Image (cartoon, coloured by chain):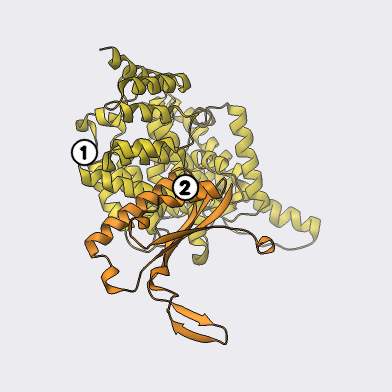
Amino acid sequence: MQSSEILPHLFRNEYTKIVSVLCKHIGFENIEIAEEIASETFLTATETWGIKGNPEHPTAWLYAVAKNKAKNYLQRNSIFQTKILPELTKTQTESIEPEIDLSPENIYDSQLRMIFAICHPSVSSEAQVGLSLRILCGFGIEEIADAFLTNKETINKRLFRAKERLREEKIAIELPAPEEIEDRLDSVLSTIYLLFNEGYYSISQNKPLRKDLCIEAIRLCSMLVENQITNKPQVYALLALMCFHTSRFEARQDENGEQILYQDQDTNLWNYDLIRKGEIFLNKAASGTKLTKYHLEAGIAYWHTQKEDTKEKWENILQLYNRLLQLQYSPIAALNRTYALSKANGKKEAILEAEKLDLKENHFYFALLGELYIDIDRSKSEGYFRKALSLAKTSQAKISIQKKIDQFSK
Amino acid sequence: MDEYLILMRLDLITKDAQPSPEQMQVYMKMYQDWVGGIAAQNKFVGGTGLSTEGKVIKSGQIVTDGPFAETKESIAGFITIKAKNFEEAADIAKGCPILNGPGNSVEVRKIVGVDNTR
Protein backbone atom coordinates (compact mmCIF):
# COMPACT_ATOMS: atom_id res chain seq x y z
CA MET A 1 0.00 0.00 0.00
CA GLN A 2 1.17 3.54 -0.76
CA SER A 3 1.33 5.95 2.17
CA SER A 4 -1.52 7.86 0.56
CA GLU A 5 -3.71 4.75 0.82
CA ILE A 6 -2.49 3.35 4.10
CA LEU A 7 -2.93 6.50 6.17
CA PRO A 8 -6.68 7.00 5.77
CA HIS A 9 -7.14 3.31 6.55
CA LEU A 10 -4.98 3.55 9.68
CA PHE A 11 -6.67 6.77 10.65
CA ARG A 12 -10.08 5.12 10.72
CA ASN A 13 -8.80 2.27 12.90
CA GLU A 14 -6.12 3.75 15.10
CA TYR A 15 -7.31 7.28 15.75
CA THR A 16 -10.25 5.97 17.80
CA LYS A 17 -8.03 3.60 19.79
CA ILE A 18 -5.52 6.31 20.69
CA VAL A 19 -8.30 8.69 21.75
CA SER A 20 -10.03 6.06 23.91
CA VAL A 21 -6.84 4.95 25.65
CA LEU A 22 -5.75 8.53 26.34
CA CYS A 23 -9.18 9.45 27.64
CA LYS A 24 -9.17 6.52 30.02
CA HIS A 25 -5.90 7.98 31.33
CA ILE A 26 -6.67 11.69 31.46
CA GLY A 27 -10.45 11.64 31.78
CA PHE A 28 -13.28 12.62 29.49
CA GLU A 29 -12.93 16.26 30.54
CA ASN A 30 -9.69 16.30 28.54
CA ILE A 31 -11.07 14.62 25.44
CA GLU A 32 -10.07 17.53 23.22
CA ILE A 33 -6.45 17.10 24.32
CA ALA A 34 -6.69 13.39 23.52
CA GLU A 35 -8.14 14.18 20.09
CA GLU A 36 -5.42 16.75 19.52
CA ILE A 37 -2.64 14.32 20.43
CA ALA A 38 -4.16 11.70 18.11
CA SER A 39 -4.53 14.21 15.28
CA GLU A 40 -0.96 15.48 15.75
CA THR A 41 0.28 11.91 15.62
CA PHE A 42 -1.28 11.48 12.20
CA LEU A 43 0.00 14.86 11.07
CA THR A 44 3.53 13.82 12.04
CA ALA A 45 3.00 10.53 10.21
CA THR A 46 1.89 12.30 7.03
CA GLU A 47 4.96 14.54 7.07
CA THR A 48 7.53 11.90 8.01
CA TRP A 49 6.20 9.06 5.85
CA GLY A 50 5.87 11.42 2.92
CA ILE A 51 9.63 12.07 3.05
CA LYS A 52 11.06 8.80 4.38
CA GLY A 53 8.43 6.36 3.16
CA ASN A 54 6.25 4.09 5.25
CA PRO A 55 7.83 2.58 8.37
CA GLU A 56 8.07 -1.20 8.65
CA HIS A 57 5.43 -1.39 11.38
CA PRO A 58 3.09 1.56 10.76
CA THR A 59 0.78 0.89 13.73
CA ALA A 60 3.65 0.46 16.20
CA TRP A 61 5.17 3.66 14.79
CA LEU A 62 1.93 5.53 15.40
CA TYR A 63 1.60 4.21 18.94
CA ALA A 64 5.20 5.18 19.77
CA VAL A 65 4.66 8.72 18.51
CA ALA A 66 1.30 9.01 20.28
CA LYS A 67 2.85 7.79 23.53
CA ASN A 68 5.67 10.35 23.29
CA LYS A 69 3.32 13.18 22.53
CA ALA A 70 1.07 12.15 25.39
CA LYS A 71 4.02 11.86 27.79
CA ASN A 72 5.31 15.28 26.76
CA TYR A 73 1.94 16.76 27.30
CA LEU A 74 1.45 15.08 30.66
CA GLN A 75 4.93 15.98 31.85
CA ARG A 76 4.45 19.60 30.95
CA ASN A 77 1.16 19.34 32.73
CA SER A 78 2.75 17.71 35.75
CA ILE A 79 5.42 20.43 35.93
CA PHE A 80 2.54 22.79 36.11
CA GLN A 81 0.79 20.59 38.66
CA THR A 82 3.82 19.95 40.91
CA LYS A 83 5.94 23.09 40.56
CA ILE A 84 3.81 26.00 39.56
CA LEU A 85 0.42 25.15 41.02
CA PRO A 86 1.76 24.45 44.57
CA GLU A 87 3.57 27.79 44.48
CA LEU A 88 0.32 29.42 43.65
CA THR A 89 -1.84 27.53 46.11
CA LYS A 90 0.82 26.41 48.63
CA THR A 91 -0.38 22.82 48.46
CA GLN A 92 1.59 19.75 47.43
CA THR A 93 0.41 17.41 44.70
CA GLU A 94 2.14 14.20 43.79
CA SER A 95 3.91 13.84 40.48
CA ILE A 96 2.78 10.79 38.54
CA GLU A 97 4.97 9.31 35.86
CA PRO A 98 2.61 8.83 32.92
CA GLU A 99 2.48 5.34 31.43
CA ILE A 100 0.43 5.11 28.25
CA ASP A 101 -0.61 1.51 27.65
CA LEU A 102 -1.53 0.77 24.03
CA SER A 103 -1.77 -3.00 24.39
CA PRO A 104 -4.71 -4.71 22.63
CA GLU A 105 -6.30 -5.49 26.04
CA ASN A 106 -6.16 -1.90 27.17
CA ILE A 107 -7.42 -0.61 23.81
CA TYR A 108 -10.40 -2.97 24.02
CA ASP A 109 -11.08 -2.03 27.63
CA SER A 110 -10.80 1.69 26.89
CA GLN A 111 -13.17 1.50 23.94
CA LEU A 112 -15.72 -0.50 25.90
CA ARG A 113 -15.66 2.07 28.70
CA MET A 114 -15.82 4.87 26.15
CA ILE A 115 -19.02 3.55 24.57
CA PHE A 116 -20.75 3.70 27.96
CA ALA A 117 -19.45 7.22 28.58
CA ILE A 118 -20.65 8.46 25.19
CA CYS A 119 -24.06 6.80 25.51
CA HIS A 120 -24.74 8.44 28.85
CA PRO A 121 -28.45 9.34 29.24
CA SER A 122 -27.58 13.03 29.72
CA VAL A 123 -26.70 13.28 26.01
CA SER A 124 -29.35 13.27 23.27
CA SER A 125 -29.54 10.12 21.18
CA GLU A 126 -28.60 12.07 18.03
CA ALA A 127 -25.44 13.32 19.72
CA GLN A 128 -24.68 9.82 21.03
CA VAL A 129 -24.69 8.48 17.49
CA GLY A 130 -22.55 11.41 16.28
CA LEU A 131 -20.01 11.03 19.08
CA SER A 132 -19.85 7.28 18.54
CA LEU A 133 -19.13 7.79 14.85
CA ARG A 134 -16.38 10.28 15.67
CA ILE A 135 -14.70 8.84 18.76
CA LEU A 136 -15.35 5.12 18.36
CA CYS A 137 -15.55 4.68 14.58
CA GLY A 138 -13.11 7.38 13.42
CA PHE A 139 -15.49 9.05 10.96
CA GLY A 140 -14.63 12.54 9.75
CA ILE A 141 -16.96 15.43 10.52
CA GLU A 142 -17.88 15.60 6.83
CA GLU A 143 -18.78 11.90 6.71
CA ILE A 144 -20.94 12.29 9.81
CA ALA A 145 -22.65 15.29 8.23
CA ASP A 146 -23.31 13.14 5.12
CA ALA A 147 -24.75 10.37 7.25
CA PHE A 148 -27.15 12.78 8.95
CA LEU A 149 -27.87 14.64 5.70
CA THR A 150 -26.73 17.90 7.25
CA ASN A 151 -23.68 20.20 7.18
CA LYS A 152 -20.34 20.25 9.02
CA GLU A 153 -21.23 23.26 11.19
CA THR A 154 -24.31 21.54 12.60
CA ILE A 155 -22.34 18.40 13.43
CA ASN A 156 -19.46 20.38 14.95
CA LYS A 157 -21.87 22.27 17.16
CA ARG A 158 -23.75 19.12 18.13
CA LEU A 159 -20.59 17.22 19.06
CA PHE A 160 -19.17 20.22 20.92
CA ARG A 161 -22.32 20.62 22.99
CA ALA A 162 -22.43 16.90 23.76
CA LYS A 163 -18.80 16.92 24.94
CA GLU A 164 -19.50 19.96 27.11
CA ARG A 165 -22.43 18.13 28.59
CA LEU A 166 -20.37 15.06 29.46
CA ARG A 167 -17.72 17.32 31.00
CA GLU A 168 -20.25 19.25 33.08
CA GLU A 169 -21.83 16.03 34.30
CA LYS A 170 -18.34 14.69 35.12
CA ILE A 171 -19.05 11.43 33.33
CA ALA A 172 -16.34 8.93 34.19
CA ILE A 173 -14.89 6.62 31.57
CA GLU A 174 -15.77 3.37 33.25
CA LEU A 175 -18.17 0.48 33.02
CA PRO A 176 -21.37 1.09 34.97
CA ALA A 177 -21.89 -0.76 38.24
CA PRO A 178 -23.48 -4.23 37.80
CA GLU A 179 -26.88 -3.02 39.06
CA GLU A 180 -26.82 -0.20 36.52
CA ILE A 181 -25.72 -2.30 33.54
CA GLU A 182 -29.20 -3.15 32.21
CA ASP A 183 -30.34 0.48 32.11
CA ARG A 184 -27.15 1.88 30.67
CA LEU A 185 -26.96 -0.95 28.15
CA ASP A 186 -30.35 0.15 26.83
CA SER A 187 -29.01 3.45 25.55
CA VAL A 188 -25.80 1.87 24.24
CA LEU A 189 -27.86 -0.65 22.26
CA SER A 190 -30.24 1.95 20.92
CA THR A 191 -27.26 4.02 19.72
CA ILE A 192 -25.82 1.01 17.92
CA TYR A 193 -29.28 0.25 16.51
CA LEU A 194 -29.68 3.84 15.24
CA LEU A 195 -26.21 3.74 13.74
CA PHE A 196 -27.07 0.54 11.92
CA ASN A 197 -30.45 1.78 10.69
CA GLU A 198 -28.81 4.96 9.44
CA GLY A 199 -26.64 2.73 7.26
CA TYR A 200 -29.27 0.21 6.27
CA TYR A 201 -32.42 2.19 5.65
CA SER A 202 -31.12 5.59 4.66
CA ILE A 203 -31.97 6.69 1.15
CA SER A 204 -28.66 8.43 0.50
CA GLN A 205 -26.73 7.31 -2.58
CA ASN A 206 -23.38 7.15 -0.84
CA LYS A 207 -23.24 3.38 -0.75
CA PRO A 208 -19.73 2.64 0.61
CA LEU A 209 -20.36 4.98 3.55
CA ARG A 210 -23.71 3.28 4.21
CA LYS A 211 -22.10 -0.12 4.42
CA ASP A 212 -19.34 1.25 6.68
CA LEU A 213 -21.99 2.41 9.15
CA CYS A 214 -23.46 -1.09 9.30
CA ILE A 215 -20.06 -2.73 9.74
CA GLU A 216 -19.10 -0.31 12.52
CA ALA A 217 -22.39 -0.97 14.32
CA ILE A 218 -21.66 -4.71 14.16
CA ARG A 219 -18.10 -4.14 15.42
CA LEU A 220 -19.31 -2.11 18.42
CA CYS A 221 -21.94 -4.71 19.29
CA SER A 222 -19.33 -7.50 18.95
CA MET A 223 -17.22 -5.67 21.55
CA LEU A 224 -20.15 -5.91 23.96
CA VAL A 225 -20.66 -9.66 23.49
CA GLU A 226 -16.96 -10.29 24.15
CA ASN A 227 -17.27 -8.97 27.70
CA GLN A 228 -18.70 -11.00 30.58
CA ILE A 229 -20.50 -8.01 32.08
CA THR A 230 -22.13 -6.81 28.87
CA ASN A 231 -22.84 -10.02 26.94
CA LYS A 232 -26.55 -10.01 27.82
CA PRO A 233 -29.22 -11.78 25.74
CA GLN A 234 -30.48 -8.52 24.22
CA VAL A 235 -26.94 -7.73 22.99
CA TYR A 236 -26.79 -11.07 21.18
CA ALA A 237 -30.28 -10.39 19.78
CA LEU A 238 -29.21 -7.04 18.33
CA LEU A 239 -26.06 -8.59 16.88
CA ALA A 240 -28.13 -11.38 15.30
CA LEU A 241 -30.55 -8.83 13.85
CA MET A 242 -27.72 -6.86 12.25
CA CYS A 243 -26.07 -10.00 10.84
CA PHE A 244 -29.33 -11.12 9.19
CA HIS A 245 -29.95 -7.70 7.68
CA THR A 246 -26.38 -7.19 6.52
CA SER A 247 -26.45 -10.62 4.85
CA ARG A 248 -28.79 -9.15 2.22
CA PHE A 249 -26.92 -5.87 1.80
CA GLU A 250 -25.51 -6.63 -1.67
CA ALA A 251 -28.82 -7.97 -2.97
CA ARG A 252 -30.84 -4.89 -2.06
CA GLN A 253 -29.52 -2.46 -4.66
CA ASP A 254 -28.72 -2.74 -8.35
CA GLU A 255 -25.78 -0.98 -10.05
CA ASN A 256 -27.80 2.23 -10.39
CA GLY A 257 -28.45 2.34 -6.67
CA GLU A 258 -32.07 1.42 -7.23
CA GLN A 259 -33.70 -0.62 -4.46
CA ILE A 260 -34.53 -4.25 -5.25
CA LEU A 261 -37.63 -5.53 -3.46
CA TYR A 262 -37.25 -8.52 -1.18
CA GLN A 263 -39.16 -10.95 -3.40
CA ASP A 264 -37.04 -10.00 -6.43
CA GLN A 265 -33.65 -10.33 -4.73
CA ASP A 266 -31.00 -12.70 -6.08
CA THR A 267 -30.37 -15.09 -3.18
CA ASN A 268 -26.92 -15.90 -4.61
CA LEU A 269 -25.90 -12.45 -3.43
CA TRP A 270 -26.94 -13.16 0.14
CA ASN A 271 -24.07 -13.69 2.56
CA TYR A 272 -24.71 -17.13 4.06
CA ASP A 273 -21.74 -16.83 6.38
CA LEU A 274 -23.42 -13.88 8.09
CA ILE A 275 -26.75 -15.74 8.18
CA ARG A 276 -25.08 -18.63 10.03
CA LYS A 277 -23.44 -16.23 12.45
CA GLY A 278 -26.80 -14.58 13.03
CA GLU A 279 -28.35 -17.96 13.85
CA ILE A 280 -25.64 -18.67 16.45
CA PHE A 281 -26.15 -15.26 18.05
CA LEU A 282 -29.94 -15.65 18.01
CA ASN A 283 -29.59 -18.94 19.89
CA LYS A 284 -27.42 -17.24 22.48
CA ALA A 285 -30.04 -14.50 22.78
CA ALA A 286 -32.62 -17.09 23.82
CA SER A 287 -31.38 -17.32 27.43
CA GLY A 288 -32.96 -15.16 30.11
CA THR A 289 -36.55 -14.07 30.52
CA LYS A 290 -36.61 -10.58 29.07
CA LEU A 291 -38.09 -10.33 25.58
CA THR A 292 -36.83 -7.20 23.84
CA LYS A 293 -37.68 -5.62 20.51
CA TYR A 294 -34.26 -6.80 19.32
CA HIS A 295 -35.29 -10.42 19.93
CA LEU A 296 -38.51 -9.94 17.98
CA GLU A 297 -36.89 -8.03 15.13
CA ALA A 298 -34.08 -10.58 14.95
CA GLY A 299 -36.71 -13.32 14.76
CA ILE A 300 -38.46 -11.51 11.90
CA ALA A 301 -35.13 -10.98 10.12
CA TYR A 302 -34.29 -14.66 10.62
CA TRP A 303 -37.48 -15.78 8.86
CA HIS A 304 -36.67 -13.42 6.00
CA THR A 305 -33.46 -15.34 5.41
CA GLN A 306 -35.70 -18.32 4.52
CA LYS A 307 -36.56 -17.51 0.92
CA GLU A 308 -39.42 -20.00 0.42
CA ASP A 309 -42.93 -18.67 1.04
CA THR A 310 -44.10 -21.29 3.52
CA LYS A 311 -47.19 -21.04 5.73
CA GLU A 312 -44.93 -21.57 8.75
CA LYS A 313 -42.68 -18.67 7.77
CA TRP A 314 -45.46 -16.09 7.49
CA GLU A 315 -47.30 -17.36 10.55
CA ASN A 316 -44.13 -16.90 12.58
CA ILE A 317 -43.47 -13.47 11.13
CA LEU A 318 -47.08 -12.44 11.88
CA GLN A 319 -46.85 -13.53 15.51
CA LEU A 320 -43.51 -11.76 15.95
CA TYR A 321 -45.03 -8.55 14.56
CA ASN A 322 -48.07 -8.98 16.85
CA ARG A 323 -45.73 -9.06 19.83
CA LEU A 324 -43.43 -6.32 18.53
CA LEU A 325 -46.34 -3.90 18.11
CA GLN A 326 -47.47 -4.58 21.66
CA LEU A 327 -43.99 -3.64 22.87
CA GLN A 328 -43.58 -0.60 20.66
CA TYR A 329 -45.79 0.84 17.94
CA SER A 330 -44.35 2.03 14.64
CA PRO A 331 -46.18 2.69 11.36
CA ILE A 332 -43.74 0.54 9.39
CA ALA A 333 -44.21 -2.40 11.78
CA ALA A 334 -47.99 -1.93 11.49
CA LEU A 335 -47.80 -2.09 7.68
CA ASN A 336 -45.41 -5.05 7.67
CA ARG A 337 -47.65 -6.85 10.12
CA THR A 338 -50.60 -6.34 7.79
CA TYR A 339 -48.59 -7.77 4.88
CA ALA A 340 -47.66 -10.81 7.01
CA LEU A 341 -51.35 -11.13 7.93
CA SER A 342 -52.28 -11.32 4.24
CA LYS A 343 -49.72 -14.09 3.75
CA ALA A 344 -50.78 -16.03 6.87
CA ASN A 345 -54.55 -15.42 7.07
CA GLY A 346 -55.46 -14.31 3.56
CA LYS A 347 -55.88 -11.04 1.70
CA LYS A 348 -59.52 -10.39 2.60
CA GLU A 349 -58.78 -10.32 6.33
CA ALA A 350 -55.68 -8.20 5.70
CA ILE A 351 -57.70 -5.63 3.71
CA LEU A 352 -60.19 -5.26 6.57
CA GLU A 353 -57.32 -4.75 9.00
CA ALA A 354 -55.45 -2.40 6.67
CA GLU A 355 -58.47 -0.14 6.40
CA LYS A 356 -58.43 0.34 10.17
CA LEU A 357 -54.91 1.78 10.04
CA ASP A 358 -54.73 5.54 10.25
CA LEU A 359 -51.82 6.07 7.88
CA LYS A 360 -53.40 8.10 5.09
CA GLU A 361 -50.30 10.28 4.57
CA ASN A 362 -47.98 7.35 4.09
CA HIS A 363 -47.18 6.16 0.56
CA PHE A 364 -46.32 2.68 1.87
CA TYR A 365 -49.88 2.41 3.18
CA PHE A 366 -51.41 2.90 -0.27
CA ALA A 367 -48.76 0.73 -1.91
CA LEU A 368 -49.77 -2.03 0.54
CA LEU A 369 -53.48 -1.62 -0.30
CA GLY A 370 -52.57 -1.67 -4.00
CA GLU A 371 -50.68 -4.91 -3.45
CA LEU A 372 -53.52 -6.50 -1.46
CA TYR A 373 -56.16 -5.64 -4.09
CA ILE A 374 -54.05 -6.75 -7.06
CA ASP A 375 -55.86 -10.09 -7.63
CA ILE A 376 -59.17 -8.96 -6.11
CA ASP A 377 -59.99 -5.66 -7.82
CA ARG A 378 -57.53 -4.42 -10.45
CA SER A 379 -58.96 -0.93 -10.84
CA LYS A 380 -58.95 -0.38 -7.08
CA SER A 381 -55.41 -1.72 -6.96
CA GLU A 382 -54.25 0.69 -9.68
CA GLY A 383 -56.00 3.58 -7.93
CA TYR A 384 -54.14 2.84 -4.70
CA PHE A 385 -50.79 2.62 -6.47
CA ARG A 386 -51.47 6.00 -8.13
CA LYS A 387 -52.31 7.45 -4.74
CA ALA A 388 -49.05 6.00 -3.39
CA LEU A 389 -47.15 7.58 -6.29
CA SER A 390 -48.60 11.00 -5.48
CA LEU A 391 -47.44 10.71 -1.87
CA ALA A 392 -43.97 9.21 -2.50
CA LYS A 393 -41.20 11.64 -1.67
CA THR A 394 -38.02 10.02 -2.97
CA SER A 395 -37.22 9.28 -6.59
CA GLN A 396 -36.43 5.67 -5.69
CA ALA A 397 -39.87 5.13 -4.17
CA LYS A 398 -41.47 6.76 -7.21
CA ILE A 399 -39.59 4.51 -9.61
CA SER A 400 -40.61 1.30 -7.87
CA ILE A 401 -44.29 2.36 -7.61
CA GLN A 402 -44.30 3.48 -11.27
CA LYS A 403 -43.11 -0.02 -12.23
CA LYS A 404 -46.17 -1.47 -10.50
CA ILE A 405 -48.50 0.94 -12.33
CA ASP A 406 -46.87 0.14 -15.68
CA GLN A 407 -47.86 -3.51 -15.25
CA PHE A 408 -51.55 -2.58 -15.42
CA SER A 409 -51.26 -1.37 -19.03
CA LYS A 410 -49.64 -4.63 -20.18
CA MET B 1 -58.26 9.51 23.25
CA ASP B 2 -59.30 7.86 26.50
CA GLU B 3 -58.19 4.55 27.91
CA TYR B 4 -60.58 1.64 28.26
CA LEU B 5 -60.26 -1.67 30.02
CA ILE B 6 -61.54 -4.77 28.29
CA LEU B 7 -62.20 -7.59 30.76
CA MET B 8 -62.55 -11.06 29.25
CA ARG B 9 -64.74 -13.51 31.11
CA LEU B 10 -65.10 -17.19 30.48
CA ASP B 11 -65.41 -20.50 32.24
CA LEU B 12 -62.02 -21.47 33.62
CA ILE B 13 -63.31 -24.11 36.04
CA THR B 14 -65.69 -26.63 34.47
CA LYS B 15 -63.61 -29.52 33.07
CA ASP B 16 -65.70 -30.00 29.87
CA ALA B 17 -65.31 -26.34 29.02
CA GLN B 18 -61.49 -26.49 28.91
CA PRO B 19 -59.90 -26.58 25.44
CA SER B 20 -57.46 -29.29 24.36
CA PRO B 21 -53.85 -28.20 23.81
CA GLU B 22 -54.47 -28.11 20.03
CA GLN B 23 -57.58 -25.96 20.45
CA MET B 24 -55.66 -23.80 22.87
CA GLN B 25 -53.04 -23.13 20.22
CA VAL B 26 -55.72 -22.07 17.74
CA TYR B 27 -57.35 -19.80 20.34
CA MET B 28 -54.01 -18.25 21.24
CA LYS B 29 -53.33 -17.43 17.60
CA MET B 30 -56.78 -15.85 17.24
CA TYR B 31 -56.20 -13.87 20.42
CA GLN B 32 -52.71 -12.71 19.38
CA ASP B 33 -53.99 -11.69 15.93
CA TRP B 34 -56.76 -9.67 17.59
CA VAL B 35 -54.37 -7.91 20.00
CA GLY B 36 -51.83 -7.44 17.17
CA GLY B 37 -54.54 -5.71 15.16
CA ILE B 38 -55.28 -3.33 18.02
CA ALA B 39 -51.56 -2.65 18.46
CA ALA B 40 -51.19 -2.02 14.72
CA GLN B 41 -53.71 0.80 15.09
CA ASN B 42 -51.54 2.18 17.90
CA LYS B 43 -54.43 1.60 20.31
CA PHE B 44 -52.86 -1.03 22.56
CA VAL B 45 -51.84 0.20 26.01
CA GLY B 46 -51.17 -2.99 27.97
CA GLY B 47 -52.64 -6.21 29.19
CA THR B 48 -52.05 -9.85 29.83
CA GLY B 49 -53.63 -13.22 30.48
CA LEU B 50 -54.23 -14.42 34.03
CA SER B 51 -53.66 -17.73 35.79
CA THR B 52 -56.67 -19.96 36.40
CA GLU B 53 -56.01 -20.18 40.13
CA GLY B 54 -56.70 -17.26 42.40
CA LYS B 55 -57.31 -16.10 45.93
CA VAL B 56 -60.27 -14.08 47.06
CA ILE B 57 -59.98 -11.95 50.16
CA LYS B 58 -63.27 -10.91 51.72
CA SER B 59 -64.07 -8.33 54.33
CA GLY B 60 -62.89 -9.65 57.68
CA GLN B 61 -59.62 -10.97 56.18
CA ILE B 62 -61.23 -14.23 55.07
CA VAL B 63 -59.15 -15.79 52.31
CA THR B 64 -60.58 -18.44 49.98
CA ASP B 65 -59.22 -20.19 46.91
CA GLY B 66 -60.80 -18.58 43.88
CA PRO B 67 -64.54 -19.09 44.19
CA PHE B 68 -65.75 -16.87 41.42
CA ALA B 69 -69.34 -15.62 41.41
CA GLU B 70 -70.33 -17.93 38.56
CA THR B 71 -68.06 -20.34 36.68
CA LYS B 72 -68.95 -18.47 33.47
CA GLU B 73 -67.68 -15.26 34.93
CA SER B 74 -64.05 -15.98 35.72
CA ILE B 75 -61.76 -13.26 34.49
CA ALA B 76 -59.37 -14.88 32.02
CA GLY B 77 -57.44 -11.79 31.08
CA PHE B 78 -57.61 -8.12 30.38
CA ILE B 79 -56.20 -5.55 28.02
CA THR B 80 -56.23 -1.78 28.08
CA ILE B 81 -56.74 0.13 24.86
CA LYS B 82 -56.98 3.68 23.58
CA ALA B 83 -60.24 4.73 21.94
CA LYS B 84 -62.06 7.95 21.02
CA ASN B 85 -65.22 6.97 22.91
CA PHE B 86 -67.18 4.07 24.38
CA GLU B 87 -68.60 3.20 20.99
CA GLU B 88 -65.18 2.71 19.42
CA ALA B 89 -63.95 0.80 22.46
CA ALA B 90 -66.98 -1.51 22.26
CA ASP B 91 -66.38 -2.01 18.51
CA ILE B 92 -62.84 -3.14 19.21
CA ALA B 93 -64.05 -5.39 22.03
CA LYS B 94 -66.59 -7.02 19.67
CA GLY B 95 -63.66 -8.49 17.73
CA CYS B 96 -62.38 -10.37 20.78
CA PRO B 97 -62.16 -14.03 19.73
CA ILE B 98 -63.35 -15.42 23.09
CA LEU B 99 -66.82 -14.23 22.05
CA ASN B 100 -66.92 -17.19 19.64
CA GLY B 101 -67.55 -19.35 22.70
CA PRO B 102 -71.16 -19.41 23.89
CA GLY B 103 -71.62 -17.96 27.36
CA ASN B 104 -68.35 -16.02 27.27
CA SER B 105 -68.39 -12.26 27.59
CA VAL B 106 -66.22 -9.19 27.53
CA GLU B 107 -66.81 -6.06 29.53
CA VAL B 108 -65.63 -2.59 28.55
CA ARG B 109 -64.93 0.00 31.21
CA LYS B 110 -63.50 3.46 30.82
CA ILE B 111 -60.40 4.10 32.94
CA VAL B 112 -60.80 7.21 35.07
CA GLY B 113 -58.89 8.70 37.95
CA VAL B 114 -59.94 7.94 41.52
CA ASP B 115 -61.34 11.46 41.83
CA ASN B 116 -63.64 11.08 38.83
CA THR B 117 -65.16 7.68 39.42
CA ARG B 118 -68.71 8.88 39.11
Q: Can you tell which chain is drawn orange?
A: B
Q: Height in image: A97 above or below A133?
A: below
The residue labelled by disc 1 is A309
Amino acid carrying label 1: it is Asp
**Which is nearer the eye, A117 or B22?**
B22
Work out how far the residue at label 2 is from the one at label 1, CA to CA, in angstroms: 34 Å
Q: Height in image: A227 above or below A137?
A: below
The residue labelled by disc 2 is B91
x, y (%) of residue A98?
56, 55
x, y (%) of residue A79?
68, 52
Assign a secondary structure to mark 2: helix
Q: Can you tell which chain is drawn yellow?
A: A
Q: Which mark is residue A370?
A: none
**In the drawing, does residue B105 fall left or right of residue A180?**
left
Q: Name the image quarter holding the N terminus of chain A.
A: top left
Q: Height in image: B94 above or below A399?
A: below
**Which is nearer the eye, B14 or A395?**
B14
